[in-house]
Amino acid sequence: MAGDGHGSVPRHTTVLAIPSWAVFVAIERHPERGARLRELERIIDTAEQDPTAAIHEIQQIRKTAEAEAGL
């Protein structure tokens, strides 16, 4: 049973993970969106250019995915 103290995942952790999982699924449901998100993450990780536009686009992708997931 979740959160029973016997090595299971605490209930609050599971509840918090559901919205993240729903957003992940909503993004990956559209392969081009998932690919673009990974490309934007690479832009930020490499720090070779100003990440402002990439951050803004990631926020828009997440906002769209959250709406699709009903969050």
Image (tube, grey):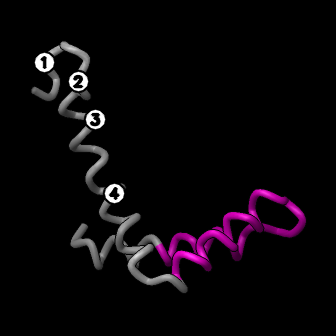
How busy is the neighbourhood of tag 2: few (under 14 within 10 Å), some, or many (20 plus)?
few
Q: Which mark is residue 21?
A: 4
- Give yes or no for contact between labels 4 and 3 (Cβ–Cβ under 8 Å): no
Name the residue that disc number 3 marks.
Answer: 13
Instruction: Give yes or no for residue 10 being in the magenta stretch.
Output: no
Q: Mark 4 or mark 2: which is in front? A: 2
Q: Secondary structure at mark 1?
A: loop
Lateral position of residue 57 relative to residue 53, left or right: left
Q: CA distance from mark 1 to mark 2?
A: 7 Å
Between discs 4 and 2, the one toward the N terminus: 2
Residue at x 24%, y 40% (from the top left corner): 14
Q: Which mark is residue 25?
A: none
Q: CA distance from mark 3 to mark 1?
A: 13 Å
Q: Mark 3 or mark 1: which is in front? A: 1
Q: Quadrant of residue 25?
A: bottom left
- Give yes or no for contact between labels 4 and 2 (Cβ–Cβ under 8 Å): no
Residue type at tag 2: Ser
Name the residue that disc number 1 marks.
Answer: 4
